[in-house]
Amino acid sequence: MKDKVIIITGSSSGIGKALAFECARQGARLVLASRSAIEDPALRKISETILYIPTDVTQESDCQALIQKAVDKFGRIDVLICNAGISMRALFAEVDLNVIRQLMDTNFWGTVFCTKYALPYLLQSRGSVVGVSSIAGYKGLPGRSGYSASKFAMQGFLEVLRIENLKKGLHVLIACPGFTASNIRNVALSKDGTAQGETPLDESKLMPAEEVANKIITAIKQKKHRLILTSQGKMTVLLNKFFPEFMDKMVYNHMAKEPNSPFK
């Protein structure tokens, strides 16, 4: 990754932050996008070649400006990592539709906007587009209707992008972590759009964000098309191919056991 120009959205926490640190260690030139875009002193100690850009990925103009500022600063783009994302937990029958709209705007449209404006430069560099999706993009998760919908949509979009540019040297990676230790569940939206404020999972038992980041970076180097993480995630995707109705029941039972689950 040395001297590669890498844009990371949602870089202020979780997987995005872990990706920023690991890419910096490997000598990349970073463009870090988040709503706050506050400089991290610990990251600055590793690399001084970092551009912070306040970005709301739900706004097309912000995404266009992000790409233009990256090109103005570094003259090229080698990797775009679309990582910005939010989650939710609520029954569809009870959720305010604005919650689902927020998830689609961030998780799906944020990916589309950034990719649209970065694509000409990525084609020039024969670079990589990375969508940080989820196992929820393979199997619908009850209580996460907007989250699963946005990740399914993201994966469909990225598949088309890969196929359309099959002969142009563009690399497209769909990375699907399983449950990862991060703050995404703490800030997940409840049925009325307020932050959940707590995680229903034991975060200490989940894959660390740093491990996820390392595996994503390795997959970029190896030009992989797909990355499915955790043994539980791999098993879910595999079994769902052959036994979808069985997996419906398994997923229901698993999610119903969460503390304060919205359904039983």
Image (tube, rainbow, N blue to C red):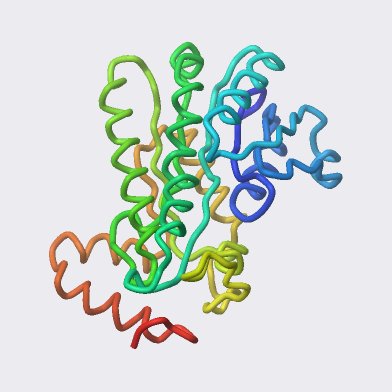
**Left or right: 191 with respect to 205?**
left
Q: Residue at x 35, y 58 (%)?
A: 148
Seen from the viewer's position, the closer of residues 193 and 68 is 193
In the displayed structure image, the side of residue 69 where residue 231 appears, left or right? left
Q: Quadrant of the N terminus?
A: top right
Q: Position of residue 4 (x, y in %)?
A: 62, 24
Can you give x and y, in whole percent of width and height, for residue 220 in the image?
48, 35
Q: Between 247 and 65, which is closer to the camera in this rendering?
A: 65
| Spot occupied by residue 228 in the image (x, y as percentages of width and height) | 38, 53
Figure check: 204 above or below 137: below
Count of numbered marks: 0
Q: In this view, does 194 lie above or below 7?
A: below
Location of residue 110 in the rendering, given as x and y in whole percent from the top left corner? 49, 39
Q: Which residue is pictured at 57% across the width and 48% down the height?
A: 214
Vertical placement of residue 82 versus 94, above or below: above
Q: Which of 162 and 54 is in front in this view?
A: 54
Q: Answer left or right for 151 relative to 220.
A: left
- Residue drawn 37% across and 78% down? 255
Depth check, front residue: 248 or 100:
100
Quadrant that contains the C terminus? bottom left
**Figure quadrant of residue 184:** bottom right
Q: Which residue is drawn at 62% across and 23% down?
A: 65
Image quarter of residue 240: bottom left
